[in-house]
Image (cartoon, coloured by chain):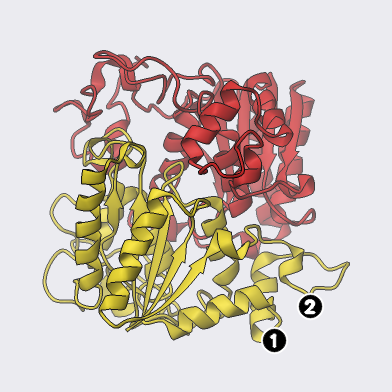
Chain colours: A yellow, B red
């Protein structure tokens, strides 16, 4: 399998980097073809701004959606963005690895999403009609591929549990797993999350590394999170609200968008 | 009241900028003292990296938490970060205004949080004991102040509704409202969110502007989101899990962290 790992930690000797190397070692041992986007090492530019759209005239308003659409359609995106899009097309699996900062990805990785996810590529694709609302949420340019997060969190695991004060980790990651990965079509695997990242010792590292190796060994076979497909009948079109009665008993909020049970539609 | 508005859109002629000017006009008319951090205009640096910690030796590992703690304690944070911290201390109310990109804030604003929220200022403060787990979630350096989001979203309002495919807007914003604003102590007001931002006409703009003016008029008096205080007895310490039976009937996930009813504890 071809795997792209996008890595977002500033320190080459960090816990994140050590875990990345564990993942790389395991993926290479399994014979996968690997490419790495190490955003800090690449000097990745985080913010979306005018320089992202060289075709935009000096007096023209920067409307990010319109500018992205035009730049993608006319192949005038910047070279760094084009290269990342090419990597996403090449890869059968995408791994985003980052430390959880303020319950979200670091700015440099958010900027990778903001810039690389062009209109016409990651969104704004497909037909809008009475039966379809574009190619998104399970369909799109990256459908048929797999994606997964590797996350290091500083806090305690219980603080991210079902009743933990930070909110459940799966809900905190929903905007990424569902909104960023599932949206353009990826099958999203359950995330690998390790906690207490600032209080690691050798024994905990070895435990985490073993778990991570196992997750890398099953990258091709693990069962994705059973998010509902947008255009498969579960949602009203065009309001895109879940039809009544489909949810698992007691499900609400983000949990509505998981299939209650049964095989993948 | 002293108000800091942090603004994160690259285009001075955008809908976001027009709404910002509506908010500014209303706040000034009410006699508030106003400061603006226009991140794009300031050329704000988004990514956390070594240059944020000038005291860090060239051979020293960059551990962001430790580096932040040391830099804050020794007053060696960079001048741009120090200036923002001073503005946060000055302001009685903080407004973060941004377009919702990929269900989160733009990278440049995330980088403002990542860099300005120093250890010892926004986190890592207060005593940890059997009865307290630091000054956070309702306590902290910014307690007694108010905060509020102004958000423009590209999608349809229904797509962000209770059963909408994107997930409910309040849940999508929970990592910001609860995890970034409530964490260091702010009383968080319900967000102002406007939808369909790419399909605005004059009539819709005037409606949104009226609503926004009303929200600015009530900035000082509106009732905050009733998040639970961490150290007021609702959570087990140190696991910080909500005690059984406190939640509203049927509440789960992020909803657990709202007080079920009654006056503020």
**Percent x, y for residue B24?**
75, 35
- Determine whether the residue tagged by mark 2 lies in a helix, strand or loop: loop
Q: How many marks?
A: 2
Q: Residue at x 70, y 21 (%)?
A: B2
Give the residue at x 32% y 84%. Answer: A1
Which residue is at a point 42% across and 16% down the rendered structure image? B126
Q: In front: B26, or B97? A: B97
For mark 1, does the 10 Å Cα neighbourhood hold few (<14), some (14 to 19), or many (20 or more) residues? few
- Residue A225 x %, y %: 24, 66
Which residue matches tag 2? Answer: A55
Residue at numbered disc 1: A74
Q: Is residue B64 left or right of residue A46?
A: left
The circle drawn on residue A152 is none
| Relative to A40, residue B68 above or below | above
The chain letter for the residue carrying disc 2 is A
For marks 1 and 2, the one nearer the N-term is 2
The image quarter in which residue A137 lies: bottom left
Asked if A193 appears above or below A263 in the picture, the reply is: above
Say which of B25 and A33 sits in front: A33
Residue placed most toward the observer, B253 or A117 = A117
Q: Chain of mark 1?
A: A
- Answer yes or no: do the residues labelled 1 and 2 have beta carbons within 8 Å? yes
Q: SS at mark 1?
A: loop
Image coords of residue B28 (percent x, y):
78, 27
Picture layout, residue A67 above or below residue A244: below
- The span from disc 1 to disc 2 (Cα, nearest Å) is 9 Å
Q: Residue at x 74, y 72 (%)?
A: A53
In this rendering, would A181 be left or right of A221? right
Quadrant of the snapshot with the N terminus of chain B:
top right
- The quadrant holding residue A210 is bottom left
Crowd class of label 2 (few under 14; some 14 to 19; many from 20; radius 10 Å): some
């Amino acid at each position: 399998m071809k795997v792209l790992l996008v890595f977002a930690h500033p320190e080459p000797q960090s816990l994140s980097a050590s875990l990345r190397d564990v993942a790389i070692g395991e993926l290479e041992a399994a014979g996968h073809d690997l490419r790495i986007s190490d955003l800090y090492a690449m000097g990745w530019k985080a913010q979306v701004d005018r320089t992202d759209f060289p075709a935009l005239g000096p007096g023209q308003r920067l409307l990010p959606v319109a500018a992205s659409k035009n730049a993608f359609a006319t192949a005038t995106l910047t070279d760094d963005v084009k290269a990342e899009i090419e990597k996403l097309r090449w890869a059968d699996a995408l791994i985003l690895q980052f430390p959880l900062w303020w319950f979200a990805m670091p700015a440099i990785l958010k900027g990778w999403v903001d810039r690389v996810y062009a209109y016409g590529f990651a969104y704004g694709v497909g037909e809008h009609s009475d039966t379809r609302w574009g190619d998104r949420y399970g369909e799109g340019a990256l459908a048929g591929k797999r994606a997964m997060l590797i996350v290091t969190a500083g806090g305690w695991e219980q603080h991210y549990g079902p009743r933990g004060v930070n909110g459940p980790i799966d809900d905190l990651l929903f905007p990424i797993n569902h909104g960023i990965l599932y949206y353009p079509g990826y099958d999203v695997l359950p995330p690998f999350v390790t906690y207490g990242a600032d209080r690691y010792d050798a024994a905990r590292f070895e435990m985490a590394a073993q778990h991570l190796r196992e997750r890398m060994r099953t990258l091709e076979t693990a069962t994705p999170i059973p998010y509902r497909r947008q255009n498969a009948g579960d949602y009203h079109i065009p309001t895109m609200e879940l039809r009544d009665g489909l949810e698992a008993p007691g499900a609400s909020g983000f949990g509505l968008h998981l299939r209650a049970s049964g095989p993948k539609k």
